[in-house]
Amino acid sequence: MRTTGQFTLSAAERELLPSDEEVKEYAARGWYLSRKLFDDDEADALTAASERFYAGQRDRVLPVRPPNLAYWEPSRGQVQRHNDYIHYECHEIGRILRKPLVAAVAARLAEATEIRLFQATLIYKPPVAGEITNVVPWHADRHYWQTCTSERMLTAFIPFHGCGTEMGTITIVDGSHLWREIPGDDSTRHFAQRDRDELTRLLDEMARHNGAEVNAIPMVIPKGHMSFHHCRVYHGSGHNVSGRPRRSISLHLQDGENRWRPYRRPDDSLLVYNHDVVVGKTSEGTPDYSDPVYCPVLWRDGNSGV
């Protein structure tokens, strides 16, 4: 058994980490499909806890409401549900997401010695044919995290069940994290605030700008497994035509070196991420992206993140 303070992996869990070759492939392609990191009981516990949450159970609530908070409520009906800060408001979900093995995988991929939680969003795609909100247009997470210094941040997409194309699984544009950006676009605007056709055109323009093709790969994910993607890779998802709800969490992760930085949008306004009005302050008076209440350390190791 390997122990580093509170972070422990058994010998069996260490066999589930990405190999050196898989780490190289992640660096080249921008995504990785994991082995089984949650057992069936853990996956089922996520489903049960999410249902209690949707029924109104909260262990605690945010002390303030950030300006761009995604927060589905029953009055919004049968649309795609997004609920940010689920790790904070639901203790059971937070406990499961803090499983060291998940962050240890992220540390291997990001080649980091420490991984902290950045954000966790509970997502539910209703089995409603043609529901337009179920379609997530192409975007890259880094665009919304411009107040972060790190270029190594990544996201684990965690379905609570087997998830394939019929459920509208996450789809990755292979290798797009290596593309050069087209200057001038205000990419900090969230995809929910932008026209879907516009974002599709922007992706095509990005591909042409880089002499590349859009190679979109759906992630077919068995129960207990998850996908990881680089913060700069383009991704989206389609309709849920399975007849069953698609239940998942997007677990956004930061390496230990990440810090807040000021970032100005094209109109010269200062970008504000939700954390900036929630987390504590550093000694310099800036938002503390290592605030242990909202951004706890999930993995720490002195030997190259393994």
Image (cartoon, rainbow, N blue to C red):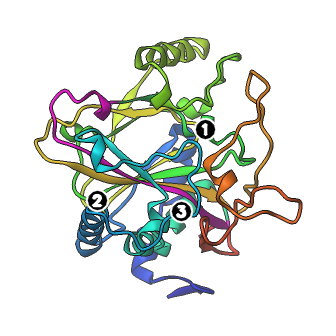
Query: On the image, numbered disc 2 is attached to which residue?
Result: 54
Q: Residue at x 31, y 32 (%)?
A: 133
- Residue 21 visible (yes or no): no
Q: Tell me residue 212's x, y (percent).
A: 52, 18
Query: Callout 3, which amino acid?
Result: Leu
What amino acid type is highlighted by mark number 2? Tyr
Q: Which residues are magenta?
A: 113-135
Q: How many marks?
A: 3
Query: Badge 1 is on which residue?
Result: 144
Q: Which one is in front, 179 or 234?
A: 234
Residue at 50 percent of width and 67 percent of height: 88
Indicate left or right for 5 with 50 as reference: right
Q: Mark 1 touching mark 3, by CB under 8 A? A: no
Above or below: residue 223 compared with residue 5: above
Residue 62 marker? 3
The x, y position of residue 160, in whole percent, is 27, 59
Q: Is residue 252 above or below residue 101?
A: above
Residue 163 on image: x %, y %: 24, 48
